[in-house]
Image (cartoon, helix red, strand yellow):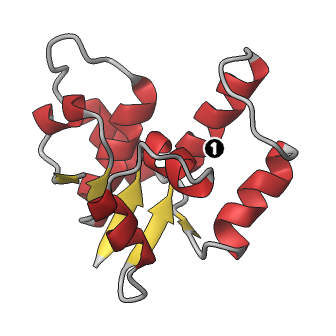
Amino acid sequence: MKFLLDTHALLWYTLGAPQLSRKAESLILNAGNDIYVSPASYWEIAIKISIGKLTVEQPLEKFLDTCEQQYGFQLLAISAAHAVAVSELAFPKNHRDPFDRLLVAQAIVEQMQIIGSDTALDAYPVTRIW
């Protein structure tokens, strides 16, 4: 199966954080699954580092390389179809996070499920697994 990691799942997995659910970890570790990461998550991580909300123990470039090389996550490029899908998404009450909206659009277009803890994603027409 194909899964798209939300930003928290990506961070929690790569940092070995206890917040990652056992189910999420199991799906990520299953060699039969294709695990994707969006550049939107990389961008979100970079912004959080630059404003001091996140610290990683290595340079960001090395961290991102590790995500793809060591963990085998595949980068899901952002396409025009993803942008169109974002424009067609409804705005659920109290949820306008642009990063989440792009992840949802990518998951819809690419027919993927999202691995993530954010219950706000449940307001969208996508399957979230945690």
Please report the residue visible at 38 percent of the width from the left and 59 percent of the height from the top.
Answer: 4
Q: Position of residue 88 (x, y in %)?
A: 21, 34
Q: Position of residue 98 (x, y in %)?
A: 42, 26
User: Would you call the spot at circle 1 few (<14 residues within 10 Å), some (14-19), or many (20 or more)?
Assistant: some
Q: Secondary structure at mark 1?
A: helix
Please report the residue visible at 27 percent of the width from the left and 63 percent of the height from the top.
Answer: 23
Instruction: Identify the image quadrant of residue 67.
Output: bottom right
Instruction: Identify the image quadrant of residue 3.
Output: bottom left
The number of numbered badges drawn on the structure is 1
Q: Position of residue 35 (x, y in %)?
A: 44, 70
Please report the residue visible at 16 percent of the width from the left and 53 percent of the height from the top.
Answer: 127
Q: Position of residue 61 (x, y in %)?
A: 83, 51
User: With 27 as the anchor, is 52 left or right in this view?
Assistant: right
Q: Compare residues 74 and 20 and report the one nearer the observer.
A: 20
Q: Is residue 49 above or below residue 109?
A: above
User: With 29 as the anchor, is 111 left or right in this view?
Assistant: left
Q: Is residue 5 above or below residue 117?
A: below
Residue at the farthest top position: 94
Q: Compare residues 4 and 11 and report the one nearer the observer.
A: 11
Residue at the farthest right position: 59
Q: Is residue 96 above or below residue 129?
A: above
Q: Compare residues 122 and 92 and report the one nearer the observer.
A: 122
Q: Which residue is mark 1?
A: 42
User: With 89 as the anchor, is 70 left or right in this view?
Assistant: right
Residue at the farthest front position: 18
Image quarter hosting the N terminus? bottom left
Q: Inspect the image, locate mark 1, and give the three-letter code of the amino acid beneath it.
A: Tyr
Instruction: Identify the image quadrant of residue 71.
Output: bottom right
